[in-house]
Amino acid sequence: MPDLLIELFSEEIPARMQGKAADDLKARVTNGLVEAGLTYAGAAAYSTPRRLALRVDGLTERSPDVKEERKGPRVDAPEKAIEGFLRGAGVARDDLIERDEKKGRVFYAVIEKPGRDAAAIVAEVLEDTIRNFPWPKSMRWGSGALRWVRPLHRITCLLSREDGSEVVELDIDGIASGRTTEGHRFMAPGAFDVTGFDDYEAKLKRAHVVLDAAERAEAIWQDATNQAFANGLEVVKDNGLLTEVSGLVEWPVVLMGEIGEDFLGLPPEVLQTSMKEHQKFFSVKNPKSGRIERFITVANRETADHGATILAGNQKVLSARLSDAKFFWENDLRVATTDGLTAWTDSLSNVTFHNKLGSQKARIERITALARELAPVVGADADLAAQAATVAKADLASEMVYEFPELQGLMGRYYSDAAGLPSEVGAACQEHYSPLGPSDDVPSAPVSVAVALADKIDTLTGFWAIDEKPTGSKDPFALRRAALGVIRLVLENELSLSLDQFIDMQLVRHKGHLIDEVSETDIDDLIREIAEHGVFGAAYLALKAKRDGATDGLVAMNGAVPDKSVDLLSFFHDRLKVYLRDEGVRHDVIDACLGMPGNDDLALLVKRAKALQAVLDTEDGENLVQGFKRANNILTQAEEKDGVEYSFGGDPKFAEHPTEVALFDALAQAESRITPAMQAQDFSAAMSAMADLRGPVDAFFEAVQVNAESDVLRRNRLNLLSSIRSTCLQVADLTKIEG
């Protein structure tokens, strides 16, 4: 069986595209070969700045012969139908055969497709792959129609066997395939021939090209860490940068340079960001002081002076970059220490957050108000939370964050500390954006938690207020991420709060400012009412507004808030389902708990769901659900038939069978345990008490006929079933449990 080698040699491919391009080449070629009838033992793809390569081992020599029988129309069918069948099958009339079937004689066509040589199939698949390659961006160059990420120069395509190799012939816009490739652009210019993959890889290495990107990355990291260790330093790990740099070089040469003394006083994050973004340098820090003192750069060639000229040029460019960073830092510190960040906060009134939601300054004011209200719930000082929320986004107006937006929040902490603000305020400046993703750390300091929650809730309620919600495929304002951030802040800090109440408060602030005739006093009064009464409805607000003689605008505003509140809470529940499913909680368990009161308290909701799942994982819990469903079904059918509701509970004095008496006693005992447990939010105890009903319920159904001939017994037993239903439904909506 032959092995296949493909190389597509071009001008430099952007590093960010190389990995996916190699995977796409492998997938498209191997899928095309298999669809054409060839099989293979294994395949691997490779990339360097100037080439994509693919090896396919153990390819079959030829696709198999295929014989197919295709059923056609009846022999007496109209002539046009028969002609259509002949065209579709690609056979002549004389090639058809007739067979007797139940409905008469029918035409059959026997279609034989001979196998093809591997070379012909490879040429066909590779041409289709090259012409339809899914580059994110591509260009058409020269006089041909081919589009490629950069000008394509050579196509190497070989089938190699033990007795030699052959070129798979194809020509794409004047680029003919061959066995020729090139080595390093500077260290080994010139072309050479190869006979197969092993020969190809070995000759490339002699020509100063490391084909495997993982091997280049490993070499860079090992050499960088060794050089740093020899100087008592350590390299700051950055896997993304390592992957990018390994895609910029074919022959990595690691060099370590020094940072000018004038720049060592800059925050380490500033040095690291500047060097990474502008120069693709790794930062090297002193483990004792934490300062960034040197840098690692990766050259693409060896030089006679061992990289001295390259380092000198890099240090010159780096000094210019860091001079800018130092200027920004010193200017920002001067502003922070003089005005205490208020100058920046005031200037944000000229920065639009969203054209329908006002300026960043208006947003800060809303977040500040909400943070003050959240503070007691999360255990933070209200004044400190409000102070932190006021300055948390001040660094957006700083020169450093304008230059390096990825440092927002972190620079806020530096500037807050420089201005002499409390340490809790600085921490909140840095942490209030978190968590940004499922693996990001969650703030735990109370002030940081209050500001982070206020920030995310304000974002969500704002876009809900203007009907800019995520769709199935689009979420331009990262609202799903914000909702997941709220969920993680609440759950990982074990916060018990009425989320609906705070959603309502912030929706009122947003909607109030969207209606001209509503005054700040009206808004404040309404928010105080929400804080006092919690969850509210449109009818209550409309009546209150009318009673208090409020303006029509306030009535209109009131009517708009609750529907959006319910809708946004449902959005949180959808995100929570995804979050809990990742933790192994069943979707029907979540649905059963969502139907219970207090479902806007996410911590309480999760506690209930986990307790219910623990019970359902036991035999008693699973069987009790079946007993509950049996009781509920019998009761529902009887209520529909009789047109009455059996909800008063049975009377033990009418019990005839011992199992009936035992069930009355068990329900009374369960109720005495469940009620206090639910009041104490001890869901495990409540559900354990519910699970203990399994035995009495099973015994009752085995021994007693509910629909007895006596009307008195029947009604009493139906009311007993109602007690089973009401007792179990205190814990969760078991009707939602599947199975």
Image: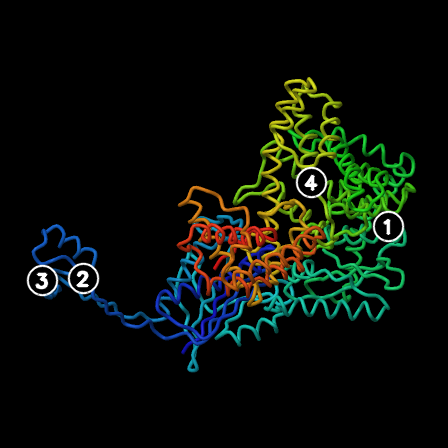
Tell me the residue that label 2 is attached to: 71
Q: Is residue 541 above or below residue 212?
A: above
Q: Can you tell which of label 1 and label 2 is closer to the viewer?
A: 2
Tell me the residue that label 3 is attached to: 105
Measured in 3D between alpha carbons, the distance from the residue under mark 1 to the one under mark 2, in whole angstroms, is 80 Å
Which amino acid is tagged 4?
Answer: Ile
Q: Is residue 454 left or right of residue 704?
A: right
Q: How many marks?
A: 4
Tell me the residue that label 1 is attached to: 266
Please identify the residue farthest to the front as the structure is shown: 653
Q: Earlier in the sequence, mark 3 or mark 1?
A: 3
Q: Are marks 3 and 1 in contact (CB under 8 Å)?
A: no
Q: Can you tell which of label 4 and label 3 is closer to the viewer?
A: 4
Mark 1 secondary-structure assignment = loop
Q: Residue at x 9, y 58 (%)?
A: 75
Measured in 3D between alpha carbons, the distance from the residue under mark 2 to the one under mark 3, in whole angstroms, is 11 Å
Q: Earlier in the sequence, mark 1 or mark 2?
A: 2
